Amino acid sequence: MEKIVTFKDFTKVDLRIGTIIKVHDFPKAHRPAYQLVIDFGSLGVKKTSAQITTQYQKEDLLGRQIVAVVNFPKKQIANFMSECLVVGAVKAKDVFLLQPEQTVKNGSILS
């Protein structure tokens, strides 16, 4: 274990469920990536990029619910402004998106 955090530290991270509503290629990214547009319900729609092109086709991502951190500061990636961070598990440098077992309301809080 690298760093110990308190429960109070953990509660500062706002993890939410959202549904991917648009997927675009991101040719200006340094590594192959997609631009995702995600609906977080009452939190609104946010954009991000994700290096998931080796495991997912664009059409397979549409309508998929995912987990994302929604309270990080915006980050400029090439010519694109990322507004959230999609969460995934890494296996041999590939990222596999985390998702709920059942469909839940967009914007639902993870606890």
Image (cartoon, helix red, strand yellow):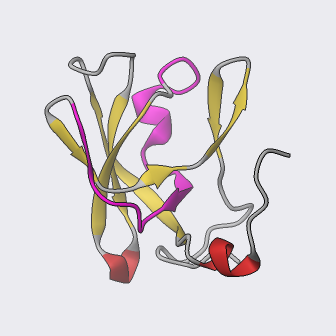
- The one nearer the camera, 51 or 62, is 51
- Residue that lies at the very extreme toward the right in this rendered image: 1
Please say whether residue 64 is one of the residues in the magenta stretch: yes
Segment tinted magenta in the rendering: 53-77
**Residue at 34% across, 46% down:** 48
Q: Is residue 66 left or right of residue 23?
A: right
- Residue that lies at the very extreme toward the front in this rendered image: 3
- Please state, as top left, top right, bottom left or bottom right, where the C terminus lies in the image: bottom right
Relative height, residue 34 to residue 2 (above, below): above
**Residue at 55% across, 55% down:** 66
- The one nearer the camera, 57 or 75, is 75
Q: Is residue 31 left or right of residue 27?
A: right
Q: Is residue 97 left or right of residue 70?
A: right
Picture coordinates of residue 58 (x, y %)?
A: 40, 30
**Residue at 55% across, 78% down:** 108
Please say whether residue 96 is one of the residues in the magenta stretch: no
- The one nearer the camera, 56 or 86, is 86
Picture coordinates of residue 37 (x, y %)?
A: 30, 51
**Residue at 35% across, 83% down:** 42
Picture coordinates of residue 22 (x, y %)?
A: 30, 46
In the rendered picture of this protein, how many numbered marks are placed on residues?
A: 0
Q: Is residue 16 left or right of residue 23?
A: right
Picture coordinates of residue 6 (x, y %)?
A: 75, 74
